[in-house]
Image: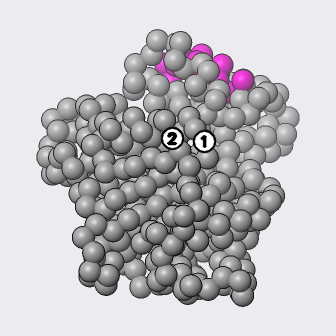
């Protein structure tokens, strides 16, 4: 892809890349430099794109510079990443895809196209259906000159990077959220809704126990039109405070809890568990994830979190386990381990719809490959 930066944009991009080559952590390097540069939103997008391309094609850039005996300069990284010259020789997969062997082997096991993981993602919005319809939201965006269209889910909109600066987002009528992440909230809503019929109740209760700053909880409130009581907990106090503010701003039926008492075990119809993970599924928007070399102790941490918070589901309640990764160890192997543990009584629940999203079904769960790659497994508790 040929990509032209102005002189000013190029200078800023080179500063960010230089810092990233020394420090890593692309997002922090962008945050440290861009705000003080006094550039427009579209200029920020171009600079960020250039930086992403260097990070995305780092292995290829280094291979090319070594092969052609070029200096490993910041300028050469940028030129090679943006123009990616054709090469006639056979390339090892690590160079061809510019990714670690672990990332590549994990993607192949999951059935995920590695070329897809190297594509620049579009921006996805989740419309706040409590205050505006998706059709009206689309009209607003198009009136402001944004190119956008309906996404696969009822509240989703897909379009250009600039959508995040739209009045729709600034006025809390939508938030930026990948559609695969929205899908987890949508399934939580559908399962909660099924409890109304099964258990003859008016308002089902959902617990989001790794809530972060509330992306999935706010999406759940939108899809349910606030007809589900959403309880949120996160171990990080600062994230809980941000979530409280967001819930008020979005007019969401969300209760943020500072502690999760044990007397609430067995209280919730649906429990959402989204523990920390290796993050490989987010490689399109965070290409540093392509260089993950292993899962470390994530599966042990994830299993401990899932086993603990699953206790908050009712008998016959649903537990949604979701992670933004596609390593076998953090997905199918982990669920298999949970199911084989005689201390716990769970069944796998596979009777949920995919709603036209690209996906790959496995034995226990499903990889949703629309934007980020997210693994979702649904368990049903039996006490």
Any part of residue 368 in sight:
no
Q: How far apart are marks 1 and 2 (CA)?
A: 6 Å
Q: Position of residue 2 (x, y in %)?
A: 51, 37
Q: Which quadrant would residue 153 be assigned to in this image?
A: bottom left
Identify the residue shown where x is 83% and y is 43%. 67
Between residues 177 and 371, which one lies in front from this camera angle? 177
Q: Position of residue 307 (x, y in %)?
A: 66, 70
Start and end of the magenta stretch?
2-19
Identify the residue shown where x is 40% and y is 24%. 41
Is 44 on the left-hand or right-hand side of 24?
left
Between residues 272 and 185, which one lies in front from this camera angle? 272
Q: Position of residue 185 (x, y in %)?
A: 40, 61
Any part of residue 241 in sight:
yes
Mark 1 and mark 2 in contact? Answer it, CB < 8 Å: yes
Q: Where is residue 33 in the image (x, y as percent from the top left)?
A: 60, 18
Q: In this view, does 299 lie above or below 149?
A: below
Magenta segment's dominant SS is helix
Between residues 325 and 347, which one lies in front from this camera angle? 347
- Confirm whether the magenta stretch covers residue 8: yes
Is 167 on the left-hand or right-hand side of 116?
left
**Which residue, given by chain and number where applicable, does mark 2 sit on?**
240
Between residues 346 and 325, which one lies in front from this camera angle? 346
- Crowding at label 2, few (<14), some or many (≥20) Cα neighbours within 10 Å? many
**Which residue, given by chain and number where applicable, does mark 1 sit on?**
236
Q: Is mark 2 on a helix, strand or loop?
A: helix
Q: What element carries label 1?
A: loop
Q: In this view, does 213 lie above or below 37?
A: below
Identify the residue shown where x is 46% and y is 83%. 316
- Single out the residue that lies furthest toward the front: 263
Q: In this view, does 353 lie above or below 150?
A: below
């Amino acid at each position: 892809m040929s990509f032209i930066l102005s002189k000013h944009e190029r200078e800023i991009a080179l500063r960010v890349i230089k810092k990233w080559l020394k420090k890593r952590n692309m997002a922090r390097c962008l945050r440290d430099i861009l705000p003080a540069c006094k550039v427009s939103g579209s200029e920020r997008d171009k600079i960020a794109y250039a930086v992403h391309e260097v990070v995305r094609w780092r292995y290829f850039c280094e291979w090319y510079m070594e092969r052609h005996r070029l200096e490993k300069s910041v300028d050469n990284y940028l030129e090679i990443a943006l123009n990616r010259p054709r090469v006639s020789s056979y390339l090892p997969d690590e160079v061809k895809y510019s990714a670690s062997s672990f990332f590549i082997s994990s993607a192949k096991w999951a059935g995920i196209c590695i070329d897809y993981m190297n594509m620049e993602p579009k921006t996805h919005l989740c419309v706040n259906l409590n205050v505006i319809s998706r059709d009206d939201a689309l009209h607003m965006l198009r009136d402001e000159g944004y190119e956008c269209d309906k996404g696969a889910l009822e509240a989703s909109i897909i379009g250009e990077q600039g959508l995040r600066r739209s009045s729709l987002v600034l006025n809390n009528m939508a938030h930026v959220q990948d559609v695969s992440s929205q899908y987890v909230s949508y399934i939580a809503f559908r399962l909660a809704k099924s409890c109304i019929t099964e258990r003859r109740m008016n308002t089902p209760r959902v617990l989001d126990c790794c809530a972060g700053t509330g992306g999935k909880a706010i999406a759940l409130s939108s899809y349910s039109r606030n007809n589900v009581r959403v309880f949120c907990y996160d171990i990080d106090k600062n994230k809980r405070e941000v979530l409280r503010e967001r819930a008020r701003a979005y007019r969401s039926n969300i209760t943020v809890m500072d502690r999760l008492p044990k007397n609430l075990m067995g209280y919730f119809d649906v429990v959402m568990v989204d523990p920390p993970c290796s993050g490989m599924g987010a490689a399109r928007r965070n290409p540093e994830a392509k260089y993950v070399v292993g899962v470390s102790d994530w599966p042990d941490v994830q299993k401990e979190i899932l086993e603990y918070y699953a206790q908050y589901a009712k008998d016959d309640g649903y537990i949604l386990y979701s992670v933004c990764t596609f390593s076998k160890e953090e997905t199918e192997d982990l669920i298999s381990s949970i199911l084989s543990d005689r201390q716990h009584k769970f069944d796998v629940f596979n009777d949920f719809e995919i709603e036209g999203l690209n996906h790959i079904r496995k034995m226990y769960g499903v990889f949703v490959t629309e934007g980020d790659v997210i693994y979702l497994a649904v368990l049903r508790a039996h006490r």
